[in-house]
Amino acid sequence: ASKSAKDGSVCLLIDCEGSGNTERDREHDARLFALAVLISSLLVFNTRGVISDGAVQALALAASLAQHIFRQHKDVAAGTKLSPSFLWVLRDFALALEDQTGKPITAQEYLEQMLGRFSSQTQPPPGADATSWEEKREARERILELFPVRDCATLVRPVDDEEDLQRLANVSVEQLRPKFRDQIRDLRGKVFGGCPTLHSPQGAEATGGAFLSLVEAHVEALNSGIVPNLGDTWQHVQQQECGRAVDEAMREFNAVTFDFASSLPRSDEDVQEALERGEAAARTRFETIAMGDADARAEHQKELNQSLRES
């Protein structure tokens, strides 16, 4: 996890099992990839070498369930995107980044170039397998639809010596190729500097508690063979967080008033002032934790007001 930013947000880096494990099936890969997409604001996907047709089709296959989940959800606040930003990292990349004329291009331009192949505007060459061409086109369209915000980063081979490569875990940073170190530094900046805050479909920022509830709900659904419903899941998470906000607010109120009670007896003015301080602290705590739309907040705000009146 990163250090807290000025706005209090934290970038949490989660490593998950990759796809293509021979001991797992495609359904497992699809569920795992869908979970990663559902709980991320930035998805880092890393493969070795160039962007090949096989790599594109493998990514599209793993992304099929996630795409299906997002297609079912239409209620999205203006300015909010459901899918995470996507960063494709290419390890041991040795290809010269240039176009057909030899002009240098960026890694992102290379990504767009490879995803733009086999588009609907491009006709298959004479003698090409029409079925294979269509499969490659559909794979690219699936990725383009699921990840409208996307980027690419390349990493050269970390060391030149084959023996050093075999014992890479024991190689010091100074022994790594300078270009690799520079690329890693750029990649780190791109990830931690460009990782947006996770939002609900309605645009509410996810708190730490909401994130944990979200992960738990999606894991439970996927393990049960149920396709997660984004609207229902986020509504449940928001209700749960608003309920927790009320509980935490009352704990804050009780802490303030308990400290004051230990100094009784005091004047009526002092008592009233202490109660007002406690209520102010409670409401601040509630606003810090609560998330969701105005209706959800208002419902739990009434619950908090009632609890404060009864205290």
Image (cartoon, rainbow, N blue to C red):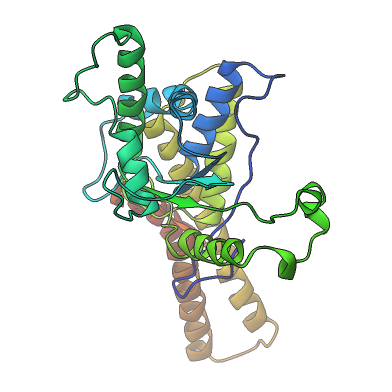
Which quadrant of the figure contains the C terminus? bottom right
Of all residues shown, which one is farthest toward the front?
101
Comparing 185 with 277, the one in front is 185
State the image coordinates of residue 264 (x, y, percent, origin top left).
66, 86
| Viewer-side residue, 128 vs 189 | 128
Residue visible at 28% across and 43% down in the picture = 100
Q: Between 180 and 202, which is closer to the camera in this rendering?
A: 180
Q: Quadrant of residue 238?
A: top left
Q: Is any part of residue 292 visible from this angle?
A: no
**In what quadrant of the picture does the N terminus appear?**
bottom right
**Residue at (47%, 83%) from the top-left corner?**
272
The answer to whether any part of residue 268 appears in the image is: yes
Comparing 202 with 154, the one in front is: 154
Q: From this view, report whether residue 128 is shown above or below residue 49.
A: above
Left or right: 160 as drawn, with respect to 179: right
Q: Residue furthest left?
A: 121
Q: Is residue 107 above or below residue 186?
A: above
Picture coordinates of residue 66, whole percent (x, y): 43, 28
The quadrant holding residue 239 is: top left
The number of numbered badges drawn on the structure is: 0
Relative to 107, 34 lies left or right? right
Measured from the top left, where is residue 85 in percent x and y? Answer: 39, 47
Is 176 on the left or on the right of 307, as rendered? right
The residue drawn where x is 54% and y is 40% is: 49
**Does residue 199 lie above or below 122 as drawn?**
below
Q: Position of residue 173 (x, y in %)?
A: 72, 67
